[in-house]
Image (cartoon, grey):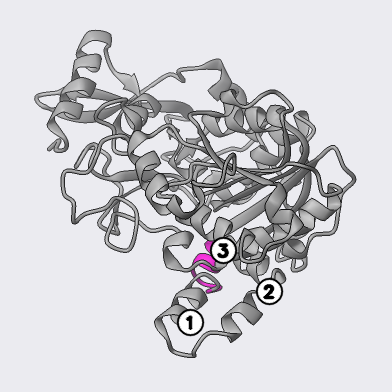
């Protein structure tokens, strides 16, 4: 039975009543990003239940330990050298959540008074007023520095080819609304959402857009009967925008996902779509509508291919464990007291059977020759891993 935030359920059901069944991608967009009632937009009704964090529905690497922010800054310093120490060196964080990663990055940048810190400008791309309030609270120590930290609602607010520096995101793309498809009677059809007898139900219909059909055609994969998966077309649009905004510099994307060959393999027959409520996973999007997170794994092959069309060349592809180890995580952890909570938290980010391997890191560069970066020292994947299968 459908449950969730009443005003949001009413808004979605009203749209379906007016227009007929809607593609799942539209349902997910409304559930997460409805401008008033969406999961990421609406202020939580329960002050004791934050959406993001150890006590929330899910947590990110920056909730665990500051080591990721320190590593990103270490990599940014090397990128700054590669670019010739530009003024300013602009760091754009897209989808900054509560601002914890930005806090850790700014703390690492300003740990010493040096030239790099004086040239950095930090831009947060965030459209949620609720999240912007969290970010301002967590970044309060740096807001008194004129021009250091600024906010924009979207990438379109950045000037074309206006960034020299680093654009990065952490666990952003997995929360983009996705199309869901399923093979039935030998045909690949799209999952739609209808509203019947007071509840949301799924139904299958022909593909809703030519872009979706093109994506599936480019995958050139034959799936068995009943196979289900997700397609994140918004991620492709996002990567195009990122490439257009970059003049010279790097794009760093951290998220959980796979190469297209792995993501769309025949052994992943049920897809990767999941919902999270108080750190418990389920696969039912029609319960707790607007009160639980929704997510799907990222196709890194197609991100890389789309980036190439915008002049973003692949610098390297690795996992979080290898990225952190290449940037001195072992030394950072070595300074912690063994068996302390901080030690255990930092190790959590490196676990080869957990966050260390599930999370991948894609680095791209534009306007420069391919450099050697410390975060890409260790290579768990073959160099051609991203080229095997993509839908760009």
- Position of residue 10 relative to residue 274, above or below, is above
Q: Are marks 1 and 3 in contact (CB under 8 Å)?
A: no
Q: Residue furthest top?
A: 18
Horizontally, residue 358 falls left or right of residue 253, namely left
Q: Residue 379, how many percent across, how many down? A: 74, 65
Residue found at x 20% / y 13%: 17
Q: Which mark is residue 328?
A: 2
Measured as percent of width and height from the top left, residue 378 is found at: 74, 68
Which image quadrant is residue 2 in?
A: top left
Residue at the disc numbered 3: 68
Label 2, secondary structure: give it: loop
Q: Can I make out residue 133 in this image?
A: yes
* Disc 1: CA contacts within 10 A as few (<14), some (14-19) or many (>=20): some
The answer to whether 66 is drawn above or below residue 25 in the figure is below
Q: Which residues are magenta?
A: 351-358
Q: Residue at x 44, y 58 (%)?
A: 60
Q: Which residue is mark 1?
A: 343
How crowded pointer 3 is (Cα within 10 Å; few <14, some 14-19, many 20+) is rated as many
Q: Residue at x 48, y 27 (%)?
A: 187
């Amino acid at each position: 039975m459908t449950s969730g935030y009443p005003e949001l359920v009413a808004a979605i059901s009203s749209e379906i009543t007016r227009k007929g069944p809607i593609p799942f991608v539209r349902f997910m967009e409304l559930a997460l990003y409805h401008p008033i009632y969406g999961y990421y937009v609406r202020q939580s009704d329960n002050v004791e239940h934050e959406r993001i964090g150890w006590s929330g529905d899910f947590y990110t690497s920056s909730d665990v330990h500051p080591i990721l922010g320190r590593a990103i800054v270490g990599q940014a310093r090397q990128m700054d050298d590669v670019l010739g120490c530009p003024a300013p060196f602009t760091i754009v964080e897209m989808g900054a959540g509560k601002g914890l990663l930005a806090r850790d990055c700014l703390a690492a940048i300003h740990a010493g008074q040096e030239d790099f810190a004086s040239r950095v400008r930090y831009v947060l791309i965030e459209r949620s007023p609720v999240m912007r309030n969290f970010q301002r609270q967590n970044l309060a120590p740096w807001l008194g520095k004129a021009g250091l930290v600024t906010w924009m609602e979207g990438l379109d607010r950045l000037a074309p080819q206006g960034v020299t520096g680093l654009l990065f995101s952490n666990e952003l793309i997995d929360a983009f609304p996705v199309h869901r498809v399923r093979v039935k009677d030998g045909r690949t059809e799209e999952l739609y959402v209808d509203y019947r007898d007071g509840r949301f139900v799924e139904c299958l219909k022909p593909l809703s857009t030519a872009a979706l059909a093109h994506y599936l055609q480019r995958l050139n994969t034959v799936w068995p009967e009943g196979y289900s998966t997700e397609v994140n077309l918004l991620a492709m649009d996002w990567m195009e925008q990122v490439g257009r905004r970059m003049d010279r510099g790097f794009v760093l994307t951290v998220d959980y996902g796979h190469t297209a060959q792995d993501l769309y393999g025949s052994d992943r027959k049920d897809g990767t779509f999941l919902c999270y409520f108080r750190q418990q996973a389920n696969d039912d999007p029609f319960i707790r509508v607007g009160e639980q997170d929704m997510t799907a794994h990222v196709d890194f092959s197609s991100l890389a291919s789309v980036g190439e069309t915008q002049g973003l060349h692949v610098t390297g592809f690795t996992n979080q464990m290898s990225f952190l180890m290449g940037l001195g995580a072992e030394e950072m952890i070595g300074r912690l007291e063994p068996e302390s909570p901080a030690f255990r938290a930092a190790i959590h980010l490196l676990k080869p059977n957990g966050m260390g391997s599930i999370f991948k890191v894609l680095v791209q560069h534009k306007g420069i020759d391919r450099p050697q970066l410390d975060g890409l020292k260790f290579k768990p994947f073959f160099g051609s891993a991203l080229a095997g299968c993509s839908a760009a």
